[in-house]
Amino acid sequence: DPTLEADAARTKYEECLGLWQQVKAPEREGCTWFYLNLWWREFAARNRSHYNMAYEEARRCCEQALICFEDAKRLDLVTGSQAVGHCL
């Protein structure tokens, strides 16, 4: 079931966030936030009745990713055409 697989993926991303926060790995934490952003954007696209809530969650995840990349001094991931900043 695709819905169960998607939920399992989100759960795994959220578990990884805890690990990266514990070991203080802001670049990896930022990547995980970025992928959670993508997860919520896809959820929003597939579940129009929850679009606004999902989009706000995607935006929050993107903002968290940007904070982590700035903390990791990875400004290349914050600015430029391939940057996370374009996920807002």
Image (cartoon, helix red, strand yellow):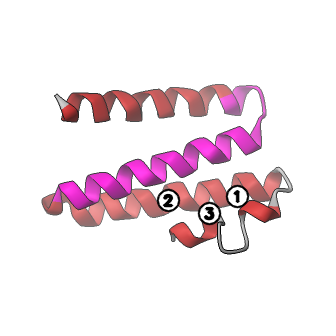
79 lies above or below 47: below
Residue 54 image-quadrant placement: bottom left
Q: Which residue ends up furthest to the left in the rendered image? A: 49
Quarter of the rendering occupied by the N terminus: top left
Disc 1 crowd rating (10 Å Cα; few below 14, some 14-19, many 20+) is some
Disc 2 to disc 1, C-alpha distance: 11 Å
User: Which residue is denoted by mark 1 in the rendering?
Assistant: 67
Q: Position of residue 6 (x, y in %)?
A: 30, 35
Of callouts 3 and 2, the N-terminal one: 2
Which is the main secondary structure of the residues drawn in magenta?
Answer: helix
Task: Name the element at disc 2.
Answer: helix
Q: Which residues are magenta?
A: 20-47
Name the disc covering residue 60, or none: 2
State the residue in front, 27 or 61.
27
Amino acid type shown at disc 3? Val
Amino acid on which disc 1 is placed: Ile
| Among numbered discs 2 and 1, the one appearing first in the sequence | 2
Indicate whether residue 39 is drawn in magenta.
yes
Labels in figure, total: 3
Is disc 1 placed on a helix, strand or loop? helix
Label 2 crowd bin: few (<14), some (14–19), many (20+), radius 10 Å: some
Query: Based on the displayed image, in which of its 4 quarters is residue 31 positioned?
Result: top right
Q: Which quadrant of the structure image shows residue 70?
A: bottom right
Task: Locate residue 68 relative to residue 44 in the image: left or right.
Answer: right
